[in-house]
Amino acid sequence: MAYNDSHYKPGPGFGLSIGSKWTRAIMILIIINVSVFVIQLLFSTISSQWGGASSGTDIDAIGHQLMPGPDQFTTVFWLYQPLAIGKLWLWQFVTYMFLHSVSSPWHIIFNMLVLWMFGSEVERAMGTRKFLTMYFTAGIFAGIFCCLFTPYSPIIGASGAIFAVEIAFAMFYPNSTIIFIVFPIKAKYLVMIFAGITVISCIMPASGNTAHFAHLGGLIYGFLFIRYEPRFSSFLLSWQKQQQEKEYQKEEDLKGQVDSLLDKVNQGGMKSLTRRERNFLRNASKRYRKTRDK
């Protein structure tokens, strides 16, 4: 069976990262990916021994024959649009990033190698929380992007998210020298080459199992995230500050109205208040008690 794997092509190496201490998030991501790969191997072995792969006779709502997975574990967790959207298996937009081809161990080897070499530097530059936000949202975006163009091709692999990490590295360290095969090249030029190859591969798809649209989606998202996320964060902080100021002003206005009504009560008693004013005081009292009890 052919897969539309998000497969990273071998080649780039970042000499300065070799031997450097990996960061916490990168270590955890690699451990999870390798652990899931071991589980895949177990299910694949059991499936091959016991003939556990699905028959491939299922039909979707529009009469398209659904592609079976090599085993039940892969079928549940890879990204396959008729299942992810058709059956609302939405977790597949996340879980597919942790699956890799069991028929080609180079798939996970190169993905994890590149994640280690580039990811540690990017995590240090961005911070762990923001890095993980970019990594997972990039993977989800890459999966959606790929499903739009190749809806009936299942996808596995972390390459969509890793391509976002690569372009983030090039944007943070554009003049860093990368050893590409045996040739030194600046990071910004290497990513341009990858982007060009990816675009050409999407326009003129060749035979093979590589999910080029997932790679392109990762590149696009990574660029947009690094370029515009700071502006979005600043806008969000500014909006939150404005909302807090509005809430504070609202509380101050409410307090002023309550004080004015209480002064009126002190001078003429409750009978001096209109029905609307009494209801206002009653509601303000309830709101105060709720705020105090929180």
Image (cartoon, rainbow, N blue to C red):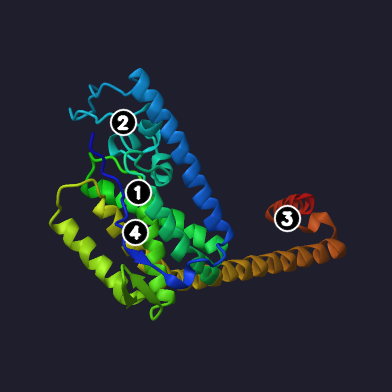
Q: Is residue 193 left or right of residue 226?
A: left
Q: Earlier in the sequence, mark 4 or mark 1?
A: 1
Disc 3 crowd rating (10 Å Cα; few below 14, some 14-19, many 20+) is some
**Closer to the eye: label 4 or 1:** 1
Q: Amino acid at mark 3?
A: Ala
**Closer to the eye: label 1 or 3:** 1
Q: CA distance from mark 4 to mark 1?
A: 17 Å
The residue beneath circle 4 is 218
The residue beneath circle 3 is 284
The residue beneath circle 1 is 107
Q: CA distance from mark 4 to mark 2?
A: 24 Å
- Say which of 233 and 68 sits in front: 68
Residue at left offset 12%, top offset 56%: 204
Q: Are marks 4 and 2 in contact (CB under 8 Å)?
A: no
Q: Is residue 137 left or right of residue 280?
A: left
When asked about the image quadrant of residue 51, the answer is top left
Secondary element under disc 1, as helix, strand or loop, is helix
Residue at left offset 72%, top offset 52%: 287
**Residue 124: x and y, percent?**
54, 69
Q: Earlier in the sequence, mark 3 or mark 4?
A: 4
Q: Earlier in the sequence, mark 4 or mark 2?
A: 2
